[in-house]
Every structure is written in structure tokens, then in C-alpha cells.
């Protein structure tokens, strides 16, 4: 403990001009021709170092966890939106927009819904009420939502089984979109998933689902591709994914970008930092080729490396320190941030 604390104190007392070691960058939000988002928890918005950097560099905010059902929905069905309010207020004070994340997710259902699972009618009412309650509070304030998150099995074999599907059937997605559209007819509604570049079969199943939803008239306006990727991902996979996703004509959100440097990958990466820049370049170039009106924006899934879920046990990964985002733990723009600026220009 002591040794770790001492090391941290030492590095935090680096001379003020240590930034020069990396070089300075223009505010990233000023170089992207689309909104640039960052994910956060509510605690960080009251940390002066975090909030000054986030407001200077980013134009959109996503809640990393505290707008999800696990936090919001109480056992009695009431909604706890205190932390969501706090993040929304921070964003508004700083001229940032908010992307809502997320209403319906296989990974989170909650005691309230589990208890209703034998009563499909009551369950459906509660489902619609939940969506209306959360979205309704931010009507006219939060312009877009991930309505359904991660609906497809990882290997692409079809829809993931979950409580929503068990009680409401496969159309739980269409029902959620309709409820969301009724709750805020102006809001842009997204469906969001991951590994769409890594696993082309998953992407194909996901895009087929979207085509079916659209054919059935579902109010769906955008596709989120999370883009939690490894630096050493095979060249070309990201480019084909972005092109395929964009081919449906909906808005495309690069919704949770981080590029992991971890070296305990199935295939170890020889030059992790070089690969990380190459991978970022491929992504930014591919996104640049998407028609401007379809580019909903790009969201980084943390501000500083030390904020990243990949450096917590929740990331589902080991505690080998990772450096997946653009700023280091002292808030300095890394060479990756410089590469970002160069690639966007
Ligand atoms: C993660 C957050 O980063 C963690 O802080 C939280 O504990 C669990 O969820 N796909 C998603 C995100 O859609 O919501 C997940 O975020 C990362 C994977």
C-alpha cells in the first residue's frame, strides 16, 4: 500500500511542463467533424481534474453504468435517477450533449421484473413503464438512447436468451423501440452491440435483425458498434465492419471505443503501441468514409487510462495495467491522442 501510494505521489508531482514530453493537441472535439463523446461515472464529474479535461476535449457524455437498470430500477419498481441527473446537469453546464445508455440489456433485469415473469401482461406494462419513466424524465434533454444493448449471442447464432425474450418473445426488441418512441418521439433510437468487427457472423446476424425490425416498421434510427477492440486485431476487419454497418443507411455510432494493449491476448501483439495507432487509423479512416449525415459520433469508453473499465476487475480481464484510451492517468494527451488528431485531419 505504502509503496504504491508513494509511487503515485511521486508521479503526480511531475513538473507542470511534463506535458511537453508528449506534445500538446488541439481540443479533440474541435478536430472531429462529428460529436465526440466520453463515458463516465457520476463521481468523476465532481473531480475537477476529470471534469476540466472532459469538458475541454469532448462534446458528448455517456453514463458508463448509472443509467442502467441495475442502478436505476428499485425492487418496488421506483426509479433512482439521482446520478443520471448529476451527469446530465454536468453535461448541460458544459455545453455537452448526452447519449442515453442503456434501457434494455440481457445482462440486467432485476428483482422487480423477475417477480413479474409469470404474469406477461403485467410484465409488458412494467417494461413499457420503465422505458417511459427513464426516457420521460429526460424528454427533450437526452436526444438519443441505446434502447437495446447486446441482443446477439457472441458467436452470432441468433438472439441471446434473456428474461425479456423469455417473457415477451423475440419481439421484445421491437416492443422496446415502440415504447421508447412513444416516450419521446423526437429521440433517436439505437441498438448497440460489440465484436461486430471481430466476428463477421455476429455482425451478419445483428444486421439481419435490424433489417427485419425496419421491415416491420420499428422506430430505429441508429446502430451502435461498441468497438472494444484489441490493438492487434487483424487489419481490414474494422474497415469491412464499418462499411457493412453503414450500408443499412442508419446512423452509425462508434459507441464505446477502447483499444486494449494487453499482452496476454490469445495472439500476443509484437508491437502493441504501433498496432494500436494502426488500428485507430483504420477505424477513423473507415468512419470518415461513412456519409456525414450517418456519422452520429464517436465515444471513448473512458477519459484517462486510469478511468478505464479494462483496469478494473469488472472489465472481466486480469489486472495487468492497460492503456486503451487517449489520455494518460495524469490527463496528458498520449501519442495515441496525437495520432487521433493526425488521422482525423
Ligand atoms: C461496463 C462499464 O464500463 C463498467 O463500469 C460496468 O460495471 C459494466 O459495464 N458493453 C456495454 C457497456 O454496453 O455498458 C459496458 O460497460 C461494457 C461492455
Image (spheres, helix red, strand yellow):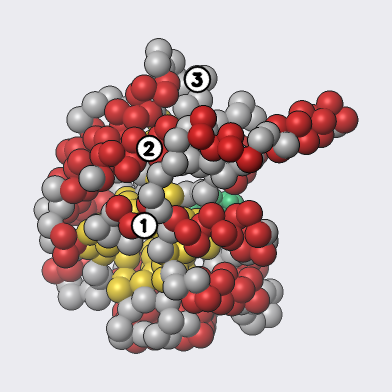
Marks 1 and 2, Cα distance to the nearest angstrom?
13 Å
Q: Relative to residue 49, is residue 77 depicted above or below?
A: below
Mark 3 C-beta closer than 8 Å to ligand 1: no
Callout 3 crowding tier (Cα within 10 Å): few <14, some 14–19, many ≥20: some
State the image coordinates of residue 112 (x, y, percent, origin top left).
Answer: 62, 73
Which residue lies under the disc numbered 3?
Answer: 263
Q: Quadrant of residue 170?
A: bottom left
Q: Quadrant of residue 223?
A: bottom left
Mark 2 C-beta closer than 8 Å to ligand 1: no
Q: Residue at x 81, y 34 (%)?
A: 5
State the image coordinates of residue 161 (x, y, percent, origin top left).
Answer: 43, 54
Q: From the image, state whether disc 1 or disc 3 is nearer to you.
A: 1
Q: Relative to residue 77, is residue 59 depicted above or below?
A: above
- Outermost residue toward the top? 270
Reading the chain from its start, which is encountered first: label 2 or label 3? 3
Q: Relative to residue 336, is residue 191 depicted above or below?
A: below
Marks 1 and 3, Cα distance to the nearest angstrom?
30 Å
Specify the label residue 338 is tagged with.
2
Specify the label residue 94 is tagged with.
none
Q: Residue at x 50, y 62 (%)?
A: 55
Front-most of 204 and 170?
204
Reading the chain from its start, which is encountered first: label 1 or label 2? 1
- Do tag 1 and tag 3 residues touch (Cβ < 8 Å)? no
SS at badge 3: loop
Callout 1 crowding tier (Cα within 10 Å): few <14, some 14–19, many ≥20: some
Query: In the rendered image, which quarter contains the C terminus?
Result: top left
Q: Quadrant of residue 140?
A: bottom left
Q: From the image, state whether disc 2 or disc 3 is nearer to you.
A: 2
Front-most of 162 and 94?
94
Which residue lies under the disc numbered 1?
Answer: 29
Amino acid at each position: 500500500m505504502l509503496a504504491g501510494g508513494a509511487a503515485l505521489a511521486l508521479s503526480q508531482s511531475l513538473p507542470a511542463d511534463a506535458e511537453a514530453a508528449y506534445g500538446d493537441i488541439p481540443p479533440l472535439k474541435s478536430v472531429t467533424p462529428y460529436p465526440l463523446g466520453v463515458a463516465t461515472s457520476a463521481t468523476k464529474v465532481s473531480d475537477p481534474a476529470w471534469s476540466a479535461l472532459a469538458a475541454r476535449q469532448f462534446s458528448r457524455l455517456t453514463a458508463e453504468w448509472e443509467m442502467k437498470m441495475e442502478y436505476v430500477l428499485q425492487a418496488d419498481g421506483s426509479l433512482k435517477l439521482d446520478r443520471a441527473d448529476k451527469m446530465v446537469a454536468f453535461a448541460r453546464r458544459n455545453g455537452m450533449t448526452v447519449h442515453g445508455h442503456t434501457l434494455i440489456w440481457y445482462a440486467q433485469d432485476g428483482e422487480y421484473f423477475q417477480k413479474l415473469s409469470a404474469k406477461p401482461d403485467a410484465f409488458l406494462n412494467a417494461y413499457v413503464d420503465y422505458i417511459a419513466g427513464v426516457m420521460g424524465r429526460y424528454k427533450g434533454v437526452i436526444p438519443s438512447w441505446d434502447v437495446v444493448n447486446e441482443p446477439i449471442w457472441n458467436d452470432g447464432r441468433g438472439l441471446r436468451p434473456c428474461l425479456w425474450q423469455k417473457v415477451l418473445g423475440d419481439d421484445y426488441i421491437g416492443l422496446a423501440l415502440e415504447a421508447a418512441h412513444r416516450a419521446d418521439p423526437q429521440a433517436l433510437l439505437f441498438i448497440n452491440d460489440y465484436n461486430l468487427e471481430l466476428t463477421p457472423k455476429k455482425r451478419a446476424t445483428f444486421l439481419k435483425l435490424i433489417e427485419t425490425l425496419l421491415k416491420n416498421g420499428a422506430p430505429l434510427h441508429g446502430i451502435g458498434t461498441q468497438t472494444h477492440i484489441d490493438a492487434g486485431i487483424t487489419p481490414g476487419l474494422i474497415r469491412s465492419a464499418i462499411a457493412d454497418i453503414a450500408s443499412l443507411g442508419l446512423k452509425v455510432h462508434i459507441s464505446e471505443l477502447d483499444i486494449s494493449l494487453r499482452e496476454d491476448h490469445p495472439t500476443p501483439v509484437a508491437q502493441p503501441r504501433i498496432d494500436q495507432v494502426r488500428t485507430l487509423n483504420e477505424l477513423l479512416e473507415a468512419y470518415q468514409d461513412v456519409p456525414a449525415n450517418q456519422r452520429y459520433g464517436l465515444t471513448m469508453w473512458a477519459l484517462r487510462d486510469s478511468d478505464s473499465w479494462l483496469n478494473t476487475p469488472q472489465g472481466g480481464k486480469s489486472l495487468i495495467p492497460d492503456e486503451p484510451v487517449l489520455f494518460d492517468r495524469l490527463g496528458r494527451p498520449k501519442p495515441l491522442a496525437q495520432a487521433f488528431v493526425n488521422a482525423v485531419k
